[in-house]
Image (spheres, grey):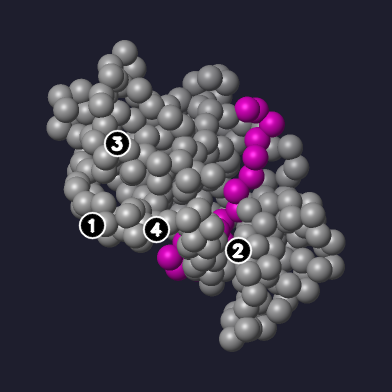
Amino acid sequence: MNITFRQIRYFIAVAEARSVSGGSSAVGISQSAVTDAIRTLEAETGVMLFHRHAKGVTLTREGHQFLRHARSIIDAIADMQGGVGREQDLTAGSVRVGVTPVVTGYFLSDLLSRFRRLFPRIEVQLVEERRDYIEHLLINGELDLAVLMVSNLEERSAIDHEVLLRSECRAWVAPSHPLSDVDGLSLADLENEPVIALTLDELEGLIDGIWSKFDHPPRVAYRTSSMEGVRSLVGTGAGITLLPDLVYRPWSLEGDRIIAKRTRESLPTVDIGIAWRRLTRHSEAATLFMETVHEHRR
């Protein structure tokens, strides 16, 4: 297999922009060159990486898998260029990090992989709990850091934080849904649609909160704590939902497609961030974890 670093860069740009034109603008290369690179990648890997459609491209299941590996390659090269040396490799210790379930499932794995690669002798002790309990553990000094939904923090007078990812909310519909081809979708278009509401972690109540701001009460058909349940119900046309891009995947486990559409209204974002007790003096291990988080975000 003959894959180049340049092809990987172009692939990531197109995946993030969801269009060849947007990807080519991001890397400053002609669309034809980017298109050729993607076709070469698909020929080399033997799989289709994108679904092409009139409004751009979306990743296939194999494309999502390739994107994860591609970002790991980019991270590894950035680490080498940053001059990671032996003295960092020999740093030892431990850091206690609190996380919420959504963060564990959709944000944490690549960050931890990078940290383990940089500092293999530092032990990361993960504590997965509800957001309110993690705040309690932080304030009591039982955790060094936490990675969680900082847009919902309650104890802001005692906890400092930085936003790492701001995730836009969009409407999810099946390709067969009459609104799937509607441009400029509005919440008013959705108010009579059956809604699938997720009751998982910090995302519980998100849909009710969104509609309450615009005076369009949702007609909730199903409530479930299963993310895959939401995808399956939406993919088979049982209803629509509003969720952040952080948890979006363009298919269900059964292989049914899901389309995510922006609305005319500006919806609240879901902000993932790192938090710590105010006025805390961090250990060397915790400091290195925070530095790695900053590099990972960039």
Please report contact status of discs 4 and 1: CB closer than 8 Å, yes or no: no
| Residue that label 3 marks | 146
Does residue 86 belong to the magenta stretch?
no
Give the alpha-carbon distance from disc 4 to disc 1, as whole Å.
14 Å
| Residue that label 2 marks | 59
Give the alpha-carbon distance from disc 4 to disc 3, as whole Å.
27 Å
Which residue sits at x=49%, y=61%? 80
Residue 206 at x, y = what percent? 43, 32
Q: Secondary structure at mark 1?
A: loop
Which residue sits at x=52%, y=32%? 269
Sooner in the amino-acid sequence: mark 3 or mark 1: 1
In the picture, which quadrant includes the N terminus? Answer: bottom right
Sooner in the amino-acid sequence: mark 4 or mark 1: 4
Q: Please, what is the dominant secondary structure of the magenta stretch? A: loop
Tally of marks = 4
| Residue that label 4 marks | 85
| Residue that label 1 marks | 121
Which residue sits at x=57%, y=68%? 63
In the image, residue 179 above or below residue 109: above
Sooner in the amino-acid sequence: mark 3 or mark 2: 2
Residue 224 at x, y = what percent? 34, 45
Q: Secondary structure at mark 2?
A: strand
Q: Secondary structure at mark 3?
A: strand
Q: Amino acid at mark 1?
A: Arg
Q: Amino acid at mark 2?
A: Leu
Which residue sits at x=65%, y=40%? 262
In the image, residue 245 above or below residue 60: above
Bounds of the magenta span? 249-266
Q: Amino acid at mark 4?
A: Gly
In the image, residue 98 above or below residue 40: above
